[in-house]
Image (tube, rainbow, N blue to C red):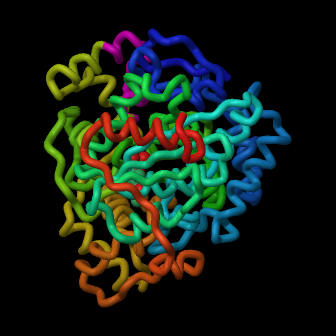
Amino acid sequence: MRYISTRGQAPALNFEDVLLAGLASDGGLYVPENLPRFTLEEIASWAGLPYHELAFRVMRPFVAGCIADADFKRILEETYGVFAHKAVAPLTQLGANEWVLELFQGPTLAFKDFALQLLGRLLDHVLTRRNERVVIMGATSGDTGSAAIEGCKACDNVDIFIMHPHNRVSEVQRRQMTTILGENIHNIAIEGNFDDCQEMVKASFADQGFLKGTRLVAVNSINWARIMAQIVYYFHAALQLGAPHRSVAFSVPTGNFGDIFAGYLARNMGLPVNQLIVATNRNDILHRFMSGNRYDKDTLHASLSPSMDIMVSSNFERLLFDLHGRNGLAVSALMDEFKATGKLSVEDDRWTEARRLFDSLAVDDEGTCATIAEVHGETGYLLDPHTAIGVKAARECRRSLALPMVILGTAHPVKFPEAVEKAGIGAAPQLPAHLADLFQRAERCTVLPNDLKAVQAFVGQHGNRGKPL
Ligand SMILES: *Cc1c(COP(=O)(O)O)cnc(C)c1O
């Protein structure tokens, strides 16, 4: 499989190089040159497979030519073997034809484990073969950092540096990062906000001199391997609910458009999906596009669902590429316009095309808490604030009551106690058994000023298993 850039000017790469690449050299994002497409008979034959075996069948075409079948099978069995629930991604029924897909049974209790547990193992496999080491730098407002650290902690060939804004992530989120103590793991608390952290990551990718030749790898959702891993659970859920003999709808709490883009790909690969709902919080740039063809940058609003607090959605460019007939120059022109003006819209027929599949809703904090309370009242089930937004959007935007509606449960409620408390239901979520002693564990973290040179000097000093590069 070859991968091409959404802006059409960068060289095509194979899977291995895409795994190690960040943005394409033309500023675009990598996508498969040709999407594999499965027949209905083939999809039907996968019913009942264990998660890792289904994962092998869905993802095999994407890694073909780079990872041998036997290796890939072993890696997948290991990856999904660390999840706490035997079903890996169990479905819980909330209402009539309405289900939550629990994607928070992994080590860090958010759906990001599905991709980052795999990414860490794939990196280790590829880097061992190449006899190469890399440095990962990432910025996090919470979930990505812990999932990336958990996913890479056993990688001999990776040193990982995760920056979070000092004193601005929840205690559970911080401890999930800082209590993992390997010599290749480096938590940096930046005296600044999340954007400051992200800016320093971007600047480091743009000028890598401080790395003395060591390659820098991205773990945010611009990395194709993350999107790829997320395609699998759409197949897994739909198969359990009667696909491919009937269609299924999905409601997806969204920030960077990564998770929902994976659902869009699942549909283009042959899975019958009749509707995809973009569920956002007050940071609603995607809702503004889907409801009114206006993708314009707004200021950032802090919400009770912080993992979706974004101003622009990096993966949206991947959808734009398809909406423009995969014309990289057209996408490039649109993104230039967006950079200059902070706004973009597409031609009417392209927007109409998107609307055939996508609906959307923006849900504020009040609506989020009300939904947590509503569902708890109906069923006793406790939603995290991100998932609650998905439930609200599913209930408002649903096209067919006869078809199953699956809401992606993106996090465990214990990660976001503030929203649960504000919902006023008197129930406090508990840490699952494997994290029960989280508050007793030792922490390690370095506080640094909001200063690029200081951060880069730190990476240079510790980037080789704690020693200088
Ligand atoms: C990252 C995250 C999201 C948003 O996912 P995208 O891929 O950015 O759309 C939603 N919910 C939770 C809990 C997350 O951690």
> Which secondary structure class fits the magenta region best?
helix
The span picked out in magenta is 315-332
Residue 399: x %, y % from top left: 38, 53
Q: Is residue 318 magenta?
A: yes
> Which of 289/156 is in front?
156
Residue at 61% over, 61% down: 241
Residue 243: x %, y % from top left: 63, 52
> Residue 68 is drawn in which quadrant?
top right
Residue at 34% over, 47% down: 255
Is residue 418 left or right of 139 when viewed as pictured?
left
**Residue 272 visible, this orientation:** no
Residue at 45% over, 16% down: 25
> Which of 293/197 is in front?
197
Is residue 155 left or right of 332 when viewed as pictured?
right
Q: Is residue 117 magenta?
A: no
> Which of 275/184 is in front?
184
Q: Quadrant of the N terminus?
A: top right
Residue 333: x %, y % from top left: 29, 13
Q: Quadrant of the C terminus?
A: top right
Residue 356: x %, y % from top left: 38, 37
> Which of 341/286 is in front?
341
